[in-house]
Structure formats: structure tokens, C-alpha cells
Amino acid sequence: MNKFEEIVSLCKRRGFVYPSSEIYGGLANVYDYGPLGVELLKNIRELWWSEFVRKSPNTVGIESQIFMHPDVWKASGHVDGFSDPLVEDKVTHKRYRADHLIEDWLTKNKKDKIDLDSLTTEELSEFIKTNNIKSPDKNELTQAKNFNLMFETDLGTIEGEKSKLYLRAETAQGMYVLFKNILDSTRLKVPFGVAQQGKAFRNEITKGKFIFRTLEFEQMEIQYFIREENWKEEFESWRKKQEHWYYETLGIDKSLLQWKPHTKLVFYAKAAEDMQYKFDWGFDEVGGLHYRTDYDLSTHTKHSGQDLSYTDPNTNEKFLPHVIESTWGLNRAFFMVLDNAYTVEETRVVLKLNKKLAPNKIAVFPLVSNKEQITKKAEEVFNMLAEKYTTYWDDRGNIGKRYKYQDEVGTPYCVTIDYDTLESNYVTIRDRDSMKQEKVLIQDLDSYFQANL
């Protein structure tokens, strides 16, 4: 197996990620998160919220809903213009993304990479035709056409009385349409940020790479409202903030990350860059930074009839703020973190996760499970630590197998209670990364972990 396949296997085997509805054959592009997966997701979310919202005096959070008035999505351009290039196998009628098929063909034939984002739908079709690219089933493909990614549903139950709704395709619009409410209920002054974490949905054409591309996913986004003349300065500032998040907070290897500027900008953007991580298949997007001008507030002002302008409290100047958008894919960050931490050594597989991200911070072991005194003492240690730290109880199998399991799931420290503990009150702490062991008194454990976690 290659590294990608090993991580997918580990995720299922150890309870990070499961195929959704697997007992019914599963559902393409949908995955569920298991006991360890939900802890890792929670840790990423909380670190992000702490770094970008709680520690920022001029950023507030909101939680808008998945369903919004359908006119929101018409005004934003999603209903008419949010699409991917689709081609269809003329025999099997299976659908594929044209750019993905071309990318696979370039890799297979060892051709130089080209900037597929800059090609129009017509140019993608011409490339497929010129190079005689076939479907995975070796059949001819149709011309590429735009495929809208919005999920539609209906409000109401009686035919003729239903109204159309959309599952949101991004979380950003909730921050724009609540802009006036936020101004009216806070004392925020430009520049300021609005942050949100939440689900988004996209009707993807083809199966993605595990959890990298799914129908349902989570975004973490900040819309930062600024004066137009300051956009270059603010863009660079947010570039550095994103880098700090990836390099320092998550602990991602710098050599595995790169910025990729967009060569083909949407009509309302003045600048856009993707943060890319080097997965097994190459560099791919895990976050982004965009200067969206005042497009979003101006289009919602126009379509809603509501004035979304800002009045400077010092000068009474009235204007529509411009926006620097910082966006992170939570599920892609989850995958990136696992990929970056996954380490194969001579005697073990270990997830060398940033300690703040580890699903379990400490594992508590009674050396043997059939000695009541040792088990009781281990339970006391577990209960004491569990009040402050995510702690895992493990009394299965021999101590070596327990260490191996905790290494695979990234637990930074294992605490073993043995016969000596009953006499001396010392426990043995094993470090995940170095595998070194040291003796610490039970009453000193909290101080030890406060200093090391």
C-alpha cells in the first residue's frame, strides 16, 4: 500500500473515519467520523476559534443556518454561475470532471502540468478531443458542459405549494447578509472580522480522494471588512496569519506547503491564492485567501433593497467596506494533519500529532488487569486526570500491544500503574515520540502534564 492507502486503512481500523452507511453498501463522497475522528475535528475547531476569534479584539463569531432565503443564492451568483466542467461517458453515461480526467491523463503520460483552472469549458473539450482522452472505461466522452454544484430541495409538502430552497454551498453568505445586524448589535469599527464554522454542501460530479472531496463538508471562514485603500496591506497580513496557523499551530512541515496564486480570477476578485499541501497525489488546496472587493455587500444591497453601508463613527463617512476572505477546509485540514503526522519507523507506526491536536492526550494503563489493588489505583489516576485532560483507559492485552495502539492513534503520553506504584506512589510515563520513560509521583502528574501538553 502507498501512504494514502495506509492512512485510509488506519482511519477505519482505529476509528477516525468510516464509510457512511457501510452496511448498506456505503454512499459515494460521504464519510462519518468515529470516536477518535470527532475528537480530532473538535480540537482543530477549538484551536482555530481560539486563535482567530477569542484572541482577536475586533473579530466576532456567528452561526448562520444551512437554509437561507433562496434569493441569497441568486444574488450571490451561485444559482447561475457555481459550476464545474462535466463530461459524460457516451456508453456507460457515467459523469466525470473534465479537468480531473485531463490531470490524470497528464500524470499517466508523464506530461508537464498545465494550469487547468485557466481553461474555459470549450478549451477543456478541445484538449480532450485533440489528445483523444477517453473515460476510465475506455469510451468516448461528450463535450464538456457546466454542472451546477448547488443542492436543491423543497419547502412544503403539497405539490403546487412548494417553494425551492438550497443547501448552502459555502458559509460566507451568512456573514454578508447578517452584516447590518452585526453592526447594529456591536460596537465594531472597520476593520473588523466575522468568523463562522459550519457545514456546506456541493453536488460533486466525481468521487473524491477519501475525505478530500465530499458532498458534505465543514468550512472555517473569516470575512474581514476593510477600507479599499488598505487591501494590499491587509491581504499580506492575513497571508502571514494563515502561515502561522499552518506552520506553528498545526505544526505542518513547511516544505509540504505552498501558496498558489489564481491565474484566472472571478470577475469580482482582485487577488486570490490557495494554500496547498503536498498529498500523495501532489499539491492540492487546503485553504484560501481572497480579496473580494465590495462585491458581496453591494450585490446584497442591490438585490435586497437594504442599505448595507458602514458609517465611520468619527468622520460620518459612509461607504461599503471591502472584504478579505480567509477560508479553511476543516475536513481537508483533518486529512492534512494525519498525513503530516503519519510516520513509519522500524518497529512501529506512529502519528506524531501536535499534542494539542491529539484525540487523547493521556492513556492510563494498569500493568495487569487481574490485580484489584493495581486496577483500583489506576482508576484513581484515571479519574484525577480525566477532570482536566482527554484521557483513555486501556487494560487490554500486554503492555507492548497497548503502547503500539496508542502510538498509532497519536496519544502523546501513556501512564502505567504497576506494583511499584502501590509502594512508592510513582507511576511510569512514556513519551510517544521518543519512547523514553520516566518515573513521576502521582501528586505531580498534573504539574507534569500542564508543562508538557
Image: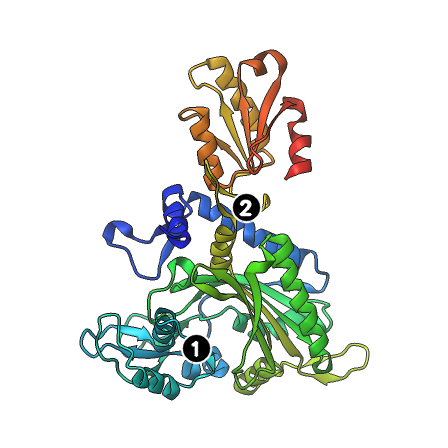
Q: Residue at x 56, y 33 (%)?
A: 435
Q: Rate crowding at label 2 as few (under 14), some (14 to 19) or many (20 or more) other CA atoms within 10 Å.
A: many
Residue 70 tag number: 1
Q: Is residue 400 above or below residue 62?
A: above
Q: Rate crowding at label 1 as few (under 14), some (14 to 19) or many (20 or more) other CA atoms within 10 Å.
A: some
Q: Quadrant of residue 296?
A: bottom right
Q: Residue at x 62, y 56 (%)?
A: 247
The C terminus: image quadrant: top right
Measure how far apart labels 1 and 2 are at the Cα level.
Answer: 42 Å
Tell me which amino acid carries mark 2.
Answer: Leu
Tell me which amino acid carries mark 1.
Answer: Pro
Which residue sits furthest top?
A: 423
Q: Is residue 358 above or below residue 258?
A: above
**According to the image, label 2 marks what residue?**
353
Looking at the image, is mark 1 or mark 2 nearer the viewer?
2
Q: Position of residue 365 (x, y in %)?
A: 50, 25
Q: Quadrant of residue 86?
A: bottom left
Residue 38 tag number: none
Q: Residue at x 76, y 79 (%)?
A: 312
Return the disc, 1 or 2, that comes first in the chain's sequence.
1
